[in-house]
Amino acid sequence: MKINSKKIWVIVIIEIIIIGIFLFNIFHTSLPDVWEMHIGDVIEATILTLVSYFLVFKDNEDNRKKDSLIRLINKIQNMLSEFNDFKTDSDASIKIARANIVCISNYIDILKKTIPDNKNIGIVVQEKETLMALILDHSNNRSYLEESRPDILKHTSNINMNLEQIIFDIA
């Protein structure tokens, strides 16, 4: 958990307020008993403030990480959906497919590093490797790519299904 200067200032200000109330109560004994604050109360308030702040911050940080992972998975899925319209009739479309598969591969590698213990990520990596072999190794052979179109769609579908399962696992 990273603590930046803004978070430290929030903690310092809250603690100064608590200690200030304690010192105010020490020097103004004419106040009613309702405002009395003992050292135990100060310690308790300080500990509760720190613990609650860090627990809330930790939850927010975890939620932000999950949201980022889900956005990354959605980006991969959007790029995979472009293979549904994959055409082998021009060099430009094959070059675009090559660029997309390399980009998808990079995103999947990021995902693998971020959540390495997920069982579905291994399946996604295997399917990605097969898909890369189909497209990159045979990008000069249009007839092979056209014949492999059902296989390409099968692998993109398998990747999509496993990415959906990863979303459910992390959410």
Image (cartoon, rainbow, N blue to C red):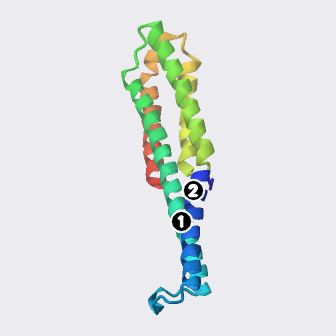
Q: Quadrant of residue 103?
A: top right
Viewed as shown, does residue 32 lie left or right of 6? left
Q: Is residue 117 visible?
A: no
Please identify the quarter of the rendering in which residue 105 is found. Answer: top right
Is residue 167 rendered to the left or right of residue 119? left
- What residue occupies the far top of the structure in this picture? 90
Q: Residues within 10 Å of mark 2 (few under 14, many from 20)?
A: few
Q: Alpha-carbon distance for marks 2 and 1?
A: 9 Å
Q: Secondary structure at mark 2?
A: helix
Task: Please state the horizontal and vertical placement of residue 94, each as a whole percent of the image.
Answer: 48, 13
| Side of 148 where 19 appears, left or right | right
| Residue under pointer 2 | 7
Q: Which residue is mark 1?
A: 53
The mark nearer the N terminus, 2 or 1, is 2
Q: Measured from the top left, where is residue 158 in percent x and y?
A: 45, 38
Q: Residue at image x 43%, y 16%?
A: 146
